[in-house]
Image: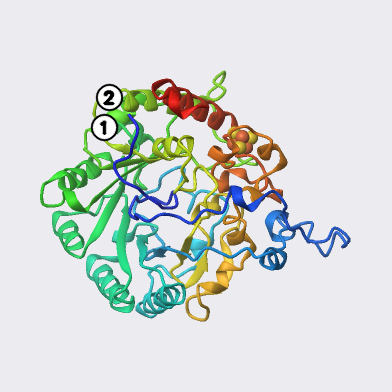
Amino acid sequence: MIGRASLFLTADLPLSLLRWPRHYDGEKCGRHIPMRSTRVSATSVGIHHPAIWPYRQLDVAALRGEGWEPTPFREFVLKVHQLCNLACDYCYVYEMADQSWRDRPKLMSTAVWQAAARRIAEHVRDHRLTQIGVILHGGEPLLAGPDRLLRLIADVRAAIPESCTVDIGMQTNGVLLTENVATRLADAGVRIGVSLDGTAESHDRRRRFRNGAGSHAALERALDLLRSPRLRPAFAGILCTVDVDADPVDTYESLLRHRPPHIDLLLPHANWASPPYRPAGRAEAYGRWLIEVFDRWYSTTSQETGIRLFEEIMDLVLGGYSRSEQVGLSPIAVAVVESDGSIEQVDSLKSAYPGACVTGSSVLTDPFDSALEHPGVVARQIGIRALSAECIECPVHRLCGAGHYAHRYRPGDGFRHPTVYCDDMLVLIGHIRRRLTADHPEIGT
Ligand code: SF4
């Protein structure tokens, strides 16, 4: 079975919403990496910066001088509400390094979303974009209430030039998704993704209310709605964070029961300072877990659903390009607008260190182009030039791309490392490549 239900491009934020070919400059970039001069003092390179790569070592001016051009943002994540009605134990917003949510407005104001809409429109015009995605995100976006969300959506749509298609999505924990809310959002053209971590037992172990009660029952009601003929077109898919202690096939089949058009399997956020939980004696546990799901998914005669991580790796094996930030070397074109108007990098970086997402720009004062020159953004758009020497020597580096950027972080020197899931990526990619080439010898190895 080769092929995909459709093409998707997003950060792993959540939704599989957007469908456009992605500019690729990975391998073509070559391996020369413009570095700042080493003839500077330790103080001037900011040796105590938590991420010397890229913030003190990547020379953006030199890259531009060589003719490198940034990729415009095409996906805009709006943090419409900072808080959440759940208290999931692995949440990167509340439970990990960055705690900036405490200092931001709880709700995105009308003034901020209208400024964001104007800045997105400006970016669309300046770069002649014909398709963009806007994702309503949080915290939990439904805490903002449907009336407010619908006003925001109307303002965004009104601001964007008619020449550009706007796909609007929302990632929710599903607890507040009533029939009335879901119908109004669907009628406004919103595609809805929900977070579900497999079986009720596995989901309720981690995705709980503050009183400790599990949220699975509430989510089941939301998923029943999204499966209905009326709302099914608005169902974007399920996002599931891997629980390596759960049975992989049971997990997959429990997700499949809701007939999602797409599933995103995400590795728990971790890095070299905060490595992932690994059961004793189970090296490569995440890779082996994913392989079991892959074999179950790949071995069916007709495709039951799409699983983005596997489809991405298969595309890469076939010589294509990646469209997510979990694998491959394609440039990341995602900007986040926080509830105070700050333009930030993808928020999974909150798992690394406080302030890791900051660009210093705001929709209230700056165009999105100002963030395109930020070293953190640039480092995610230069393909192979952002990889460590170890990764460049690795036989699967074009496919793996050092994995998720947030998972490469090592305190002190930053993001120029293999992913902390390196061993898992090696076994997973090797397995998928072997299965694919066994079925289709014409692919070669
Ligand atoms: S498998 Fe490991 S060494 Fe190879 S590219 Fe990925 S992270 Fe780097």
- Specify the farthest residue to the top: 281
What's the residue type where badge 1 is placed? Answer: Gln
User: What is the x, y in percent for residue 29?
Assistant: 63, 53
| The quarter of the displayed image where residue 354 is located | bottom right
Q: Quadrant of ligand 1?
A: top right
Residue 60 or residue 419, whichever sits in front? 60
SS at circle 1: loop
Give me the residue at 57% from left, 18% from top.
Answer: 281
What's the residue type where badge 2 is placed? Answer: Thr
Classify 154 as above or below 83: below
Q: Which residue is mark 2?
A: 300
Q: Which residue is mark 1?
A: 303
Q: Which mark is residue 63?
A: none
Residue 112 or residue 87, whichever sits in front? 112
User: Which of the image's four quarters has the N terminus?
Assistant: top left
Classify 175 as above or below 360: above
- Compared across the picture, whether 263 is left or right of 304 comes to right
Label 1–label 2 contact, CB within 8 A = yes
Residue 247 visible, this angle? no
User: What is the x, y in percent for residue 80?
Assistant: 37, 66
Classify 267 as above or below 381: above
Instruction: Mark 1: give few (<14), some (14-19) or many (20+) Cα within 10 Å.
Output: some
| The quarter of the displayed image where residue 247 is located | top left
Give me the residue at 59% from left, 29% from top.
Answer: 423
SS at circle 2: loop
Residue 203 visible, this angle? yes
Give me the residue at 43% from left, 39% from top.
Answer: 315
User: What is the x, y in percent for residue 57?
Assistant: 74, 58
- Count the marks: 2
